[in-house]
Amino acid sequence: GAGVSQSPRYKVAKRGQDVALRCDPISGHVSLFWYQQALGQGPEFLTYFQNEAQLDKSGLPSDRFFAERPEGSVSTLKIQRTQQEDSAVYLCASSYGTGGYEQYFGPGTRLTVT
Amino acid sequence: QQQVKQSPQSLIVQKGGISIINCAYENTAFDYFPWYQQFPGKGPALLIAIRPDVSEKKEGRFTISFNKSAKQFSLHIMDSQPGDSATYFCAASSGAGSYQLTFGKGTKLSVIP
């Protein structure tokens, strides 16, 4: 079956622009996670949804970062007024149950802020 | 505070050899320990995972060894192949929290013919 998909795969933004990154989880997966992966590092947690409820947003680095999953399927990560330090790969993962075990990742969106 | 420490940072193994990557954790609430494989330009792919109630789990050429008292776990890749060349990440999560994965910094494995 289809895996997690993300779009766009690459995004170049000028500093100060707003960006929106999309995640389509595996169909039927209840839990959805966003991670940020800096070059040469492991992914770092940003936020977690169970269906449409955002249960944990403790990893969001600033109030410029906002995520939503209004209908419990597709999710969007929005970054306002992008800064150079926001340059990274943004990964989305989904898992079947209400727990986060067996998280399956998408290919990521590489964001470059110039 | 780095909650999951991974070593080595890089590893070179001959084809047919055994690759061993080690991880140590600090948070005793962790109860799920997966390993992910990542190729350049791709997302991490779940390889194998273990819970703390068992000391070893094997799937094909991949084995996780788990030592709860030492708070350590390791990945063994038997009969390593050039196609195994990738970056490997250990991770841990807690069912008592939001199930977020805490990752190690990764090990870049190169398997040479």
Image (spheres, rainbow, N blue to C red):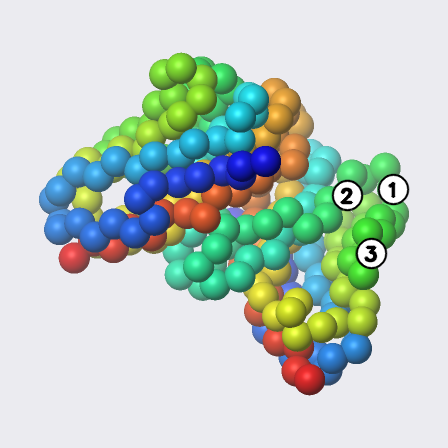
In the drawing, what numbered circle is on residue B54?
1
Mark 1 to mark 2 CA distance (whole Å): 7 Å
> What chain does badge 2 belong to?
B
**Residue A46, image quadrant:** top left
Could you classify mark 1 by the number of other residues whose Cα lies within 10 Å: few (under 14), some (14-19), or many (20 or more)?
A: few
SS for dot 3: loop
Report whether mark 3 lies on the same chain as mark 1. yes
The residue identified by callout 3 is B60
Instruction: Name the amino acid type tagged 1.
Output: Val
Question: Spatial distance from mark 2 to mark 3, Cα to Cα?
Answer: 15 Å
Distance Cα–Cα, label 3 vs label 1 = 17 Å
Residue B10, placed above or below residue A101: below
Give how far across and how far down residue A98 sits, in percent: 61, 20
Amino acid under label 3? Gly
Q: Chain of mark 3?
A: B
Q: In percent of the image, x 40 and y 15: which residue is there?
A: A71
At mark 1, the secondary structure is loop
Select label 2 or label 3 by which is in front.
Answer: 3
Quadrant housing the N terminus of chain A: top right
Q: Position of residue B23 (x, y in %)?
A: 68, 57
Element under disc 2: strand
| In the image: residue A64, left or right of residue A92 | left
Residue identifier under label 2: B50
